[in-house]
Image (cartoon, rainbow, N blue to C red):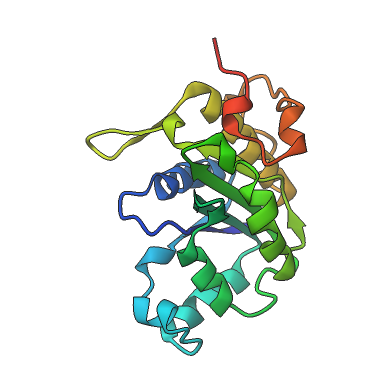
């Protein structure tokens, strides 16, 4: 199976984006993939803000990208763009750090006004870094992600089903196992999701 690097670009220590990625990591592992989590916020600020290309932490991050067959890029959307923290890391990676890799861009945000940010802000950067195959991006509303007192993440049923399909397609693109039985009916996402970066809120809710 494939090696997947799962990158959270959120600057927050209580990030819904990071929790969502770690939840999806478990699904990829059930497909048989090796998943390596990377929270950009844990990298030294001196390296990121100082644009220190030679910093050992940046070299280690670049090595993780080089090792991966596929990359999941998750980011909160701020002012219609992906996070500045994620941009800082991408700027320090080799120009073609994503060459030949399968990439799944994911985003979270508070309003559907940001739904196109994946296609218009993030996708061009991933393409410029040589990504071999960028899957259709997916946007999840913050209101569909609830964090309990114990830190556990609960995803609204309709969003959970849609995200499951997205991750299963990513797994198949990596040459993974067939779609998990837990995915349910295997229905395709609504047609509207193919026209833009597919707000999960537009997917039909389970009864």
Picture coordinates of residue 5, whole percent (x, y): 55, 60
* Badge count: 0
Q: Residue 130, can we see it?
A: no
Is 113 on the left-hand or right-hand side of 61?
Answer: right
Picture coordinates of residue 52, whole percent (x, y): 46, 87
- Residue at the limit of the structure toward the left, as seen here: 149
Where 38 sits versus 207, above or below?
Answer: below
Is 177 on the left-hand or right-hand side of 56?
Answer: right
Picture coordinates of residue 73, whole percent (x, y): 56, 56
Where 43 sits versus 152, above or below?
Answer: below
* Nearer to the camera, 20 or 182: 20
The residue at the point 62 percent across, 26 percent down is 202
Picture coordinates of residue 139, whole percent (x, y): 58, 40
The residue at the point 43 percent across, 77 percent down is 48
Q: Residue 40, can we see it?
A: yes
Is 71 on the left-hand or right-hand side of 88?
Answer: right
Where 67 sits versus 5, above or below?
Answer: below
* Nearer to the camera, 182 or 102: 102
Give the quarter of the figure containing the C terminus.
Answer: top right
* Image quadrant assignment for residue 146: top left
The residue at the point 46 percent across, 38 percent down is 110
Give the quarter of the figure containing the N terminus.
Answer: bottom right
- Residue at the limit of the structure toward the top, as seen here: 207
* Nearer to the camera, 108 or 74: 108
The residue at the point 64 percent across, 33 percent down is 165
């Amino acid at each position: 199976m494939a090696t997947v690097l799962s990158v959270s670009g959120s600057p927050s220590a209580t990030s819904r984006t990071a929790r969502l990625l770690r939840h999806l990591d478990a699904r990829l592992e059930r497909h048989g993939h090796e998943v390596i989590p990377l929270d950009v916020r844990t990298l030294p600020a001196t390296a990121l803000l100082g644009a220190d290309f030679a910093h050992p932490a940046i070299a280690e991050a670049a090595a993780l990208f080089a090792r991966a067959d596929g990359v999941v890029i998750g980011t909160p959307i701020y002012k219609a763009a992906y996070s500045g923290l994620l941009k800082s890391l991408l700027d320090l990676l080799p120009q073609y750090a994503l060459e030949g890799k399968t990439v799944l861009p994911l985003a979270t945000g508070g309003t559907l006004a940001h739904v196109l940010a994946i296609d218009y802000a993030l996708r061009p950067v991933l393409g410029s870094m040589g990504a071999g195959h960028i899957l259709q991006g997916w946007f999840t509303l913050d209101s569909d992600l609830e964090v309990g007192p114990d830190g556990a993440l609960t995803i609204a049923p309709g969003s959970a089903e849609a995200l499951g399909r997205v991750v299963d397609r990513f797994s198949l693109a990596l040459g993974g196992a067939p779609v998990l039985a837990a995915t349910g009916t295997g229905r395709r996402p609504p047609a509207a999701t193919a026209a833009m970066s597919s707000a999960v809120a537009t997917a039909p809710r389970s009864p």
